[in-house]
């Protein structure tokens, strides 16, 4: 038996996210949706989906506003703070006990490109919880076979925290199949996060954040 947590990045998408909600409801799984601020601002249907996520017991987190480049690589470091703030304003009424933030990794990579010093200071000052990851099966690149890739990656983790994407790639058509595979392998789905993937909790560094912060500006 092993624990596993599902998270979904880069949505919501009016044509995909409702299907994901339906599958999770059928399978009695609660997940976290890390949403993009510009989608909530530009499309009322996306904002409604964020509210639906909250109403159905999922957690909703901040995944930056534009998702253009990792915050630590932005030439204007003040803009990296705005990426956090603009989205969090749109999440008013949608967050639970913790304000959740996931940085943009640029393809799922971990490293000091994730955050600027200014962005980290904002996360600390506003008492955010920063949620990273340990399994990224790159479903956007291989929308049909990603479940098999994910299962191989899960085998290397004590508690996998999986990053999927509720985007119109066709990948989420295989979400139910993936869930069946996990359960057949002895997996138990839970909503909270493994400690190794949460270096910052409620603004306090519980693991060093230095590996995820750009030094000196760019």
Image (tube, grey):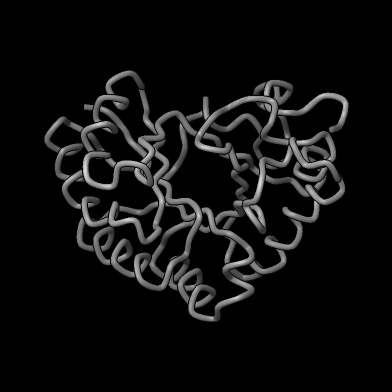
Q: Work out whether residue 213 can be spotted.
A: yes
Q: In the visual, does 74 lie left or right of 194?
A: right
Q: In the visual, does 103 lie left or right of 58?
A: right
Q: For this rendering, which residue is in front, 78 or 84? A: 78
Give the quadrant of residue 212. top right
Q: Position of residue 194 (x, y in %)?
A: 46, 31
Q: Quadrant of the N terminus?
A: top left
Extreme bottom residue here?
A: 44
Q: Which residue is drawn at 34% across and 66% down?
A: 16
Q: For this rendering, which residue is in front, 143 or 55? A: 143
Q: Which residue is drawn at 81% across and 45% down?
A: 122
Q: Residue at x 64, y 73 (%)?
A: 41
Give the quadrant of residue 131. top right
Q: Where is residue 138 in the image (x, y as percent from the top left)?
A: 38, 38
Q: Which residue is drawn at 84% across and 33% down?
A: 218
The count of marks equals 0
Q: Position of residue 4 (x, y in %)?
A: 33, 36
Q: In this view, does 99 lie above or below 208?
A: below
Q: Position of residue 202 (x, y in %)?
A: 68, 42
Q: Is residue 209 above or below residue 169?
A: above
Q: Work out whether residue 98 can be spotted.
A: no
């Amino acid at each position: 038996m092993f624990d596993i947590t599902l998270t979904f990045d880069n949505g919501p998408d009016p044509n995909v996210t409702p299907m994901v909600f339906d599958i999770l409801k059928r399978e009695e799984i609660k997940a976290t949706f890390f949403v993009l601020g510009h989608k909530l601002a530009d499309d009322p249907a996306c904002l409604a989906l964020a509210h639906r996520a909250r109403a159905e017991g999922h957690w909703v987190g901040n995944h930056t506003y534009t998702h253009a480049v990792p915050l630590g690589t932005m030439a204007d470091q003040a803009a990296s703070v705005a990426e956090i703030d603009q989205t969090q304003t749109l999440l008013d009424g949608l967050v639970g006990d913790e304000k959740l933030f996931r940085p943009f990794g640029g393809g799922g990579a971990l490293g000091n490109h994730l955050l600027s010093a200014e962005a980290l200071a904002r996360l600390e000052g506003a008492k955010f919880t920063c949620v990273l990851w340990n399994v990224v099966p790159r479903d956007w690149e291989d929308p049909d076979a990603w479940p098999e890739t994910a299962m191989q990656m899960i085998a290397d983790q004590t508690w996998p925290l999986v990053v999927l994407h509720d985007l119109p790639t066709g990948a989420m058509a295989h979400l139910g199949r993936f869930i069946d595979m996990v359960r057949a392998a002895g997996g138990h789905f839970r909503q909270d996060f493994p400690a190794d993937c949460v270096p910052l909790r409620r603004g306090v560094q519980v693991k060093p954040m230095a590996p995820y912060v750009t030094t000196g500006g760019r």
